Amino acid sequence: MAPMANATPTDQVRKFAAEQFGDEPIWLRNRRNRLLEVYLAAPLPVRQRTSLKSRKLDRIPIGSAPTAADLPDDLQNLYQVANLITVNGHTKHLSVPTTWSDQGVILLPMTQAVNTAPQLIEEYLGTVVNDEADKFQALNSALWQDGIFLYVPARVTLDHPITVTHFGSSDVSNVLPRSLVVLDEEARATIIEQYLSEPGREKSLWAIATEIVLKDGAHLQYGAMQQLAVTAESFVRRGAQIGRDAHIYWSLGEFGSSLSIAEHTSLLSAPGGQSDSTTVFFGSETQHQDYVSVAKHVAPHTTSRMVARGVMKDDSRSVFTGVTEIKKGALGTDGRQKEKILMLSDTARADVIPSLLIEENDVFAAHAASAGPVDAASIFYLMSRGLSEAEAIRMVVHGFLATVIDAIPVDVLRHNVWNAVERKIAE
Amino acid sequence: MATPVLEIKDLHVAIDGTPIIKGLTLSVKGGEVHAIMGPNGTGKTSLAQTLMGHPHYTVTSGQVLLDGQDVLAMRTDQRARAGLFLAMQYPSEISGVTTANFLRTAINSLRATQDKKPITLKEFRDRLDEAMRYLEMDLQFANRYLNEGFSGGEKKRNEILQMLMLHPRIAVLDEIDSGLDIDAIKVVAKGVHSLVGTEFGALVITHYQRILAYLKPDVVHIMIDGRIVKSGDKSLAEELETKGYDWVRQEFVHEI
Ligand SMILES: Nc1ncnc2c1ncn2[C@@H]1O[C@H](COP(=O)(O)OP(=O)(O)OP(=O)(O)O)[C@@H](O)[C@H]1O
Ligand SMILES: [Mg+2]
């Protein structure tokens, strides 16, 4: 297939990369250049239920530097609470408790970590997600901007959640955050990445990548909140490599962006590894959401739980594909998934595609998926007690999401998710 | 507030084009308890649901007035706010919504239309505890999801709890006694009685004499094939219990 034509000439993209990353170590520059060529040559990804062609993504300029910007007034309070804030891909704010630094924790913007902790970056960057998986992943891997780098030494437990905010201003064309989280043996941490943007006059392209490495016995609670503006088109790829007896808890809230394509994978590569994944999504208007959640069991006695709850309003469209993959040799594996979608409108559409790919016999795998409209009898029941139809629907939606959202182990994230749901209902 | 009056005048109701209620006239005032008895499939639940505005039922002619106001022109929630209450034969299960949270929201919806401030958490809790104790309910039920996994009897008791908390003016109780054990019937009757007064009237749909023995209805109506065919005092219920509906059919149906 022919490479995607772009609003920005390829030579100009190359020139931008050369200027932008000229100060970086040579290995990284080479890596970026190699992946830039992959990006330039790659066709648009083909997704079975999402047509990318019609979205005219090639009209979004690549590699143009936006004007300087700051968080809008209503988000200024984030300076008090966030550990890292990036605006248009550049770090605006970093705050690291000294007690953590004293324990050997490294918490830095990625572009800084490249110089401060080059050996860790070189060792792990690109080892968990496949940077050549598709055009947009290649874009991120070639031109990535600031995300968080976190290293927690063995047996260190971070006493409170790390919060990261990625913000895009109205005039930004691309935001390409890249994050890398490494938890050494038996380390424990909680991290939340939040994505926000202002609506722009033109579309913006977000290509987001987060890699997670959990050494033996490490536990990570990873949360993400995607609340990008309707003018954003987002591509997200996250991966976690899970060591022996290590445990990841994914809690992902997907609310914003007109197009949202996101995939997260738990690679259970050592015995005793566990993955708990919860995705909550809420589509409205003409949003198109296409999610893939993968639990890949390679080692024996690994466990995965995959839960998704989606609410679809207006003319929104969603696809949720859950993949539980059990490789030969992954004896005693237990992989389960459960997806449920609540349809609030006749014109919304949702596909739930659970799949179990099993190559081993002595395993347990199960899935349950459903999508259906709001129960009319329930609405009548609630209205018969004086609730307006809108209140009744709100209550049913709340109830539908409650068991999943209330189980999110991180307080701030749970509140954020509820607030986002509230806003979507009221929209 | 004035004594409520619910008037049903020559009501005709159809489901998907099939006539179910065929000219029903009835009026219930504050201070009164009316009972409706009648064989299965005769239209009792249809009447109850129609009074509350269930979208499935189409009123083809007739009138329903509450204090002279046109109930049929109101949405279901407006009817509730006007003071109508329906204890349903089959209450819905609402997953993820606790009984307490639901009741507080409902109370506040009602208060909002009366220009009252939302109920404080403390006042709400106190009232809820009191009502639950009165109905001999385990206080844990308040924290469980609304009707989810409740036994048949527990659901019925929960309907009465809602009625006590919401203080309607006219309550329609659709088989509130079915599935209840003997003690529970007493408790439910006690709950209804606690409200009966000039500001509250009840229309009780039942198949059994037992609850009526406690409720002591002022009027008992017999409904057959979408009409009230006979009304009388509570001795009519006793007579029905011994003689059955065939007796009613033979004696009264031809009168219409
Ligand atoms: N969708 C429908 N289409 C046609 N007839 C219906 C429909 N739904 C209900 N009916 C009929 O309406 C009639 C009245 O039903 P209703 O539930 O009001 O009876 P009921 O008096 O409450 O009976 P029960 O004592 O068994 O509770 C029944 O014959 C029932 O089969
Ligand atoms: Mg009935």
Image (spheres, rainbow, N blue to C red):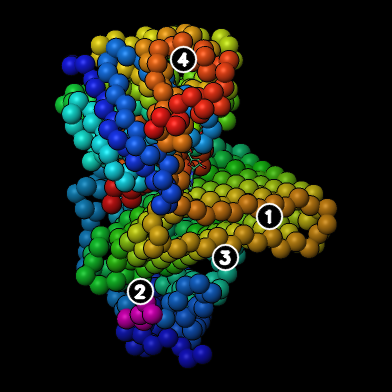
Going by the numbered disc 4, the residue's amino acid type is Leu
Task: List the residue tagged with mark 2.
Answer: A20
Amino acid type at circle 1 is: Leu
Q: Nearer the viewer, mark 4 or mark 3?
A: 4
Write down the region rendered in magenta.
A54-59
Q: Amino acid at mark 3?
A: Val
Q: Which residue is mark 4?
A: B236
Q: State which chain disc 2 sits on.
A: A
Residue at 30% across / 55% down in the picture? A92
Cα distance between the residues tagged 4 and 1: 73 Å
- Magenta portion: prevailing SS class: helix
Q: Which residue is mark 1?
A: A268
Identified at 63% across, 48% down, the residue is: A305
Residue A283, can we see it? no
User: CA gap, disc 1 to disc 3?
Assistant: 14 Å
Tell me if A105 is positioned left or right of A353 in this view: left
Q: Secondary structure at mark 2?
A: helix
Residue annotated with mark 3? A129
